[in-house]
Image: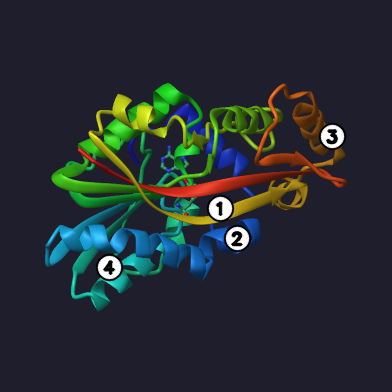
Amino acid sequence: MQKITKISKNNLETDKNVLGKNWNKTYNSYFSDTTNINLFIKACLPHIKKLNKKKIEILYVAGGNGLLGEKLILSLKKHNIKSELTLLDISQKQLDENKNPKTKKVLADILTCDLCTKFDLIIMRSSLDYIYKEKLQVKALKNIKKHLTESGLFINCCAAMPTNKDRDLADKIYASNKLIGKRHFQSKESISELYSKAGFKELKLIGKSNNMKLTEKEHIERYDFTKIEIEKIQKIILKSKVQPKNIKITKTGYLLDFIFPIYLAKK
Ligand SMILES: C[S@@+](CC[C@H](N)C(=O)[O-])C[C@H]1O[C@@H](n2cnc3c(N)ncnc32)[C@H](O)[C@@H]1O
């Protein structure tokens, strides 16, 4: 195991209820949902085909149990493209849930890892926000870029809000208590600036996965929220000076409606 950062230690602690066996069921099975997986694959396929390679090396960063990557390599096989998958995560419990003996598993932190090799394709889903400071997100993106071949592709399906104002409010909500852990979500308005800070030259929106609608119910299940956390979040939304589009108070708590755009970036 290479050096693990303070941020990642915190992520492991706050996700302790869901890492490993429980991951596929988390958030109403959003991450194992076939429609969501197929939307990602559909967005990737034309771009992978354009690489015009018979065999591609794929790195799935912060890939959890790797299900998305496994489904992608099966789909590539059907299109006569061979591939090898490397799965990287900071959670050994997540990696242990991947039962494909051909998939390489690397217990490492995306902020500090150096795999001493390059990949034709790097994929990521719903994980950049775990690195909750913009400066560190840039660092993670730079490290991802370092692991890409010259013609390599980075495809990221990220948890996002449509505007910076909604995003800032979502960040504020996540920082409001220690059970959930801080996040820095993406925003459609700021993603291109973020990627260009990391030195990516091309950024293209190539698709979208379904929205993830989170209410207090999902947070109670995942983080053991009590009335205290729910009411605190309601107050934050109520006091907000912006009129959020995707964040609302409801009778029982609140609704956070995350969008999941899929971006392709090149060196
Ligand atoms: C929301 S889950 C997404 C898992 C997977 N990408 C999926 O779509 O099912 C976030 C994952 O990122 C991992 N993670 C968090 N911080 C990380 C870091 N700094 N480096 C590597 N993995 C990290 C967590 O252990 C977790 O498995």
Q: What distance separates the C-alpha of mark 3 from that of mark 1?
A: 27 Å
Give the numbered dot on residue 102: 4
**Label located before the other in sequence (2 or 4):** 2
Give the numbered dot on residue 231: 3
- Please say which color scheme the image uses: rainbow
Helix, strand or loop under label 4? loop
What type is the residue that disc 1 sits on?
Answer: Leu
Instruction: Say if disc 1 is inside 8 Å of ligand 1.
Output: yes
Instruction: Decide which of 24, 112 is in the foreground and name it.
Output: 24
Quick one: label 4, few (<14), some, or many (20+) residues within 10 Å?
few
Instruction: Decide which of 1, 252 is in the foreground and name it.
Output: 252
What type is the residue that disc 2 sits on?
Answer: Asn
Callout count: 4
List the residue tagged with mark 2.
22
Q: Is residue 91 left or right of residue 170?
A: left
> Which residue is at 43% across, 44% downward?
90
Q: What distance separates the C-alpha of mark 4 from that of mark 1?
A: 22 Å
List the residue tagged with mark 1.
19
**Label located before the other in sequence (4 or 1):** 1
> Which residue is at 20% across, 38% downward?
267
| Quarter of the image where one finds residue 166 | top right
State yes or no: discs 4 and 1 in contact (Cβ < 8 Å): no
Instruction: Say if disc 2 is inside 8 Å of ligand 1.
Output: no
Give the numbered dot on residue 57: none
**Label located before the other in sequence (2 or 3):** 2
